Each structure stands twice: as C-alpha cells, then as structure tokens.
Amino acid sequence: MKFFYADSLDLVDPVFDFIAEKSRNPKRVPQRDDVYAHELMNGERPYDGLLVSKALFRVGGGSVATGKYSQAQRKRFEREGAPRFLRFPKSGRADSTRYPIMGDCGAFAYRNEPEPPFDIDELIDFYEDGQFSTGISLDHVVLAYDPALDREDPAQGSLPGLTSKHASTRAEAMRRQQLSLENADEFRRKSLARGVEFEPIGAAHGWSPESYRHAIRELVRMGYDYIALGGLVPRKSREIDEILRAVRTESLGHARLHLLGVVRPELFDLMRDSGVASFDSSSPIWQAFKDARDNYYSSSSEGHYTAVRIPQVDKGLPMRRIREGRIGQADAIAAEAGALGALRNYGTGDLGLDELLAALRRYDELLGDGRKTKTPWDRMERTLRDRPWADCPCPICREIGIEVILFRGANRNRRRGFHNLWWTQRVLETWRENNEA
C-alpha cells in the first residue's frame, strides 16, 4: 500500500529564523524559495506520492469562493505540469512509478452544491496538462450515511414506510451516487478515446456498506481496475471496517482500491486483505495546528502529544487585548519573551519544568479570558515532561528541537505537520516490512 499526501501548497521557509521570527532570506519569494516536505526532509520521504485536487484551482462561485492557487500559480502549474511545479521529483520529470502524483476533483469542497462545478472534458484536460500519474473520475459526495436507507437493490426507488425526511435523504443520496457512476462511465470512455497517459480511477460513493458494494460492482462492470472510495473522511473506523468487508466481495480479483482522505493504521491489515493499494490524507498536516489535542504524532502508549501554546503578541488575542487597552504592550512583550526564553532554556536543559510552566502561566494569565478553548495545561505538561522531540529521529526534530512542539506561526506548525507525515510514513513502512515481505 502507498500513502499519498493531499497537498494544499504546504511549504515552509527553509531558512526561517525562529528566534527573530523572520526569514534569513531578504529576497524570499514563497513559491520559489520555500520548500515542500519532500524537499525539507532531504531524502527521507514523508510519503509515497502526492494528491492534488482540481478544487484548489477553482475561482469564484458556490461554496468555494476562491481556490488555494493564485492566478499566477494556476498558470504556471498548467504550463509546467505537476511534477515540475511540485518538484516531485527534484528533476521535475514525471515518474509515475517512484514519484506518483494522483489527481482528483476535491468533491468535498463543493459538497453543498447540487452539481460538480466543472465538466468531464475540463477534468481530463486538467489531468493531461498536469502530467498526473492517475486521475479520479468526476464525483459528487453522498452527504448522508445511514444503512437504514438500504433496500435489496440500491438502484431501486424509496422504501415503503420511510418518513418524508428519510425519503428525501435517500433520493438525494441515490441521485449523487448515480451521477458519480454516470460520470465515471463517461470519464473512462472519453479518457480511453483520447489516449490519455494517466490511469483513470473510478470514484465510488455510498450511504452504507451495501450501497458502496453496489457502486464497486458497477465500476468493475464499466472496466475499472482501480477504484477510489470517497466520502470516508467523517466515517468512524468501525464504519470503514464494515464498508471494506462489504466491497471486497466485488473488488478482490477485479480492482485495486484507493481510500480517499483517510489514514487508519489500525485498519492496515484489513485494508490489505480488501485489496487497498493506496490511501491519501491531509490530516497529519492540519492536525498539527487545528486539532485541540493531537498535534504531534507519536508512538507513545498514551497517544499523540499536544503542542505548547505561546501566542504571538502581535497577532490574534494578544493584539486585541492591547488594542482594547486591557493589557499594556510592554507587559505583553515581556511576558511573551519570558515564556519563549523559558521554553528554549528548558529545551537545552538549563531550566526545570516547574519554572517553565510558571513562565507559561504568567503569559497565559496576562491575556485573560477570551480564548475559543481553554489552555490544555495537563496535556501540555505531559508533552514537556516526556520531551518526545528529543528522541525523535526525523529530520525536523533533529534540526529545530523543541521549536517543533511550539504552537506558533506557519513555519513551526507546518514543520510539526511534516513530522506527522514522516511518522505516518514510517509506521506504514514498518507495517510493510512486517506484513508484505
């Protein structure tokens, strides 16, 4: 199985000065001078491949007002292609075996719209111009997940006895599944007729294990031998387990599977036994700074670690407090500096844990109430006590030490996300060594 990272222009400044909080490159141009995780890791691959969604390139309209890419970046991506733009590999020459790049629609971004915002020909052009290794058919996420909506034949109409709300939910779920299947059929036929160089992947959606099985059956009948299961991101591991056990009766011996948007190490054995060849996720990055608890991945028996919060005094809550006149700017700067200095002295062993916690609390108490969530002191204390960065062999932790655990600004938060990617890939590689020899 291969792990694909769903990239969203997640770059960092390779010469960022963590003490001065600025780049050491006065002429820095982010897309040109900043680097991706696979570049910063310097040979230690943090993933097997990359996935790029067309929704990142969208401009205007609907639930996504603007994509992630600027107009200049979109034009350069179209002109250069994904391998060169992403510098994956460094040479920029497409290598679908060692450096696979998968394309998809990014259907979750337009999930609240009645139809996908682009057509099949436009999607094929995107994959072709981008020199993708593989491309997923035009799909639409089924929003509901409720096995109670099933009947023997999921292609039939509504069940007798369903409430009007359930009947409406089922009808919309069936419409979206059927739309995705019809698009997959047309996508494959047009791709083959055009002689595309990327491998077409059919997208399967459903609202239950049985409806996913129906979608897989239909895609296999169309001729697909690589199928992506979508809509799994909000599903619990138990539900994904049930879906995989249901669909493998249709896929094994006929098609490889890709899981869109999920990485679940606890399901690796089942994934292998169900014919899963690949999966993708962006959660290792976003959990580094969006999750309230699990910011730093670890194999600790007590689970992942929480990052240490020291808000930047010139942004967010500290700046609002200063502008409101509730705290003095000089006091805030001094408290912030004291917390940062204490953290670094703790990192070098020149300060004890109790002294560090006291400095962190002084800054926290100065800011007062107003946070969206309370400071997780117990979990932060566990992080600092265990010092997980000190024993981590990943390139990020070796290079920046305790800075990786500091929740503060994109250059630290994304580097912590890079550590999470590296950790995920190492877990997969260890599993492969133990189970696929």
Image: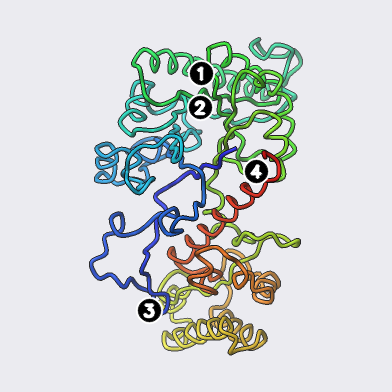
- Image quadrant occupied by the N terminus: top right
Whether residues under marks 2 and 1 lie with C-beta atoms below 8 angstroms apart, the answer is yes
User: Residue 179 bears which disc, if any?
Assistant: 1
Instruction: Look at label 3 and name its amino acid.
Output: Ala
Point out the frontmost of discs 1 and 3: 3
Which image quarter: residue 320?
Answer: bottom left
Q: Position of residue 278 (x, y in %)?
A: 57, 35
Label 4 and label 1: CA atoms lie apart by 36 Å
Residue 217, above or below 371: above
Amino acid residing under circle 2: His
Q: Which residue is labeled 3 in the image? A: 20
Determine the residue located farthest toward the front in the rendered image: 437
Q: Which residue is mark 2?
A: 140
Sequence-first disc among 3 and 2: 3
Asked if labels 3 and 1 touch by Cβ distance under 8 angstroms, the answer is no
Q: Closer to the observer: label 3 or label 2?
A: 3
